[in-house]
Every structure is written in structure tokens, then in C-alpha cells.
Amino acid sequence: RQPYTVVTLLQTVVLINDNANLPVHKQRQASAFPPNYVHSLDSSHMLLTALEMDRRGLTFSAVHDSFWTHACDIDEMNGVLRECFVDLYTRPLLEELKKTWELQYPSLEFPDLPETGDMDLDEVKHAPYFFQ
């Protein structure tokens, strides 16, 4: 078994698993997935916002769900936040996830997805308290 090496600009990390026989806690795995998936979507929204702010030549910084820019650019950042949110969530994310899993695990059967609601995501673009 070979170690897994991760190289970044600041360091090199070598990961070695000496005990591959650790038990898998199926219930913990199942209950951990939904919040981790939502967190990954939140971070995708942040990354898309950062990229769009950079494309517009605007300063942007963020930690978790706290986004910053210069005071004179707050209104524009608020627009970018909403645009990126709508762009991300109009994609069929759950359908894409399910297709990926079905391809990766063809012997498993996955439940049907819940019905899509009727919320008009474009309303987010005009919501005063969408993100504060």
C-alpha cells in the first residue's frame, strides 16, 4: 500500500493509513452526508462569488459565510451574491448527484428524488434580507 501525497504551495503532506480494518459506522456516515453536502454547496457559492468579484475587478474576502468587500462595493457584491446563488441553484444538483452515484454504484438502488417546489429563485435577486 502506497502513501497518498498532497503537495501545496506551503507544504507537502503524506497520508498513510496503517489500519484499513477500522469499522465503518454506517449510521454516522449516512447522517453526516446531508450537512456536509450543504456545506459543499455553500462553499461553491462562495467560490463562484469570489470568481465573479475578481472578474469585475472588485476586492473580495470571505470566511465561512461572512463575505467582505469595500464599503463602496457592497451593493455590487450583494448583486453578485444573488446572481451566483441563482446560477448555482437553478442547476439540477440533486439529479446530478444521483446520476453520479448510480454510475459509481450500479449495484445499489437509490430512492426517487423529492418533487421540486415552485419557488421562483429569481425572487432571491430582489430579497432585501437574502444575505446579511
Image (cartoon, rainbow, N blue to C red):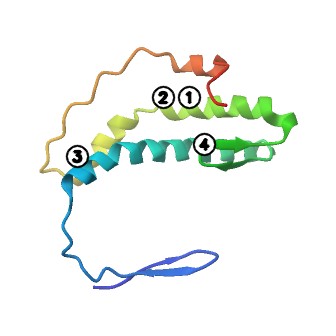
User: Would residue 76 be found to the left or right of residue 26 on screen?
Assistant: right
Q: Secondary structure at mark 4?
A: loop
Q: Are marks 2 and 3 in contact (CB under 8 Å)?
A: no
Label 3: state its secondary structure.
helix
Say which residue label 4 marks: 65
- From the image, tell me which residue sits under label 3: 102
> Looking at the image, do the residues carrying marks 1 and 3 touch, with CB atoms under 8 Å apart?
no
Q: Are marks 3 and 4 in contact (CB under 8 Å)?
A: no
The mark nearer the N terminus, 2 or 4, is 4
Q: CA distance from mark 2 to mark 3?
A: 22 Å
Give the spatial CA distance, label 3 vs label 4.
32 Å
The circle on residue 86 is: 1
Q: Residue at x 60, y 44 (%)?
A: 46
Tag shown at residue 90: 2
The mark nearer the N terminus, 2 or 3, is 2
Q: CA distance from mark 1 to mark 2?
A: 6 Å
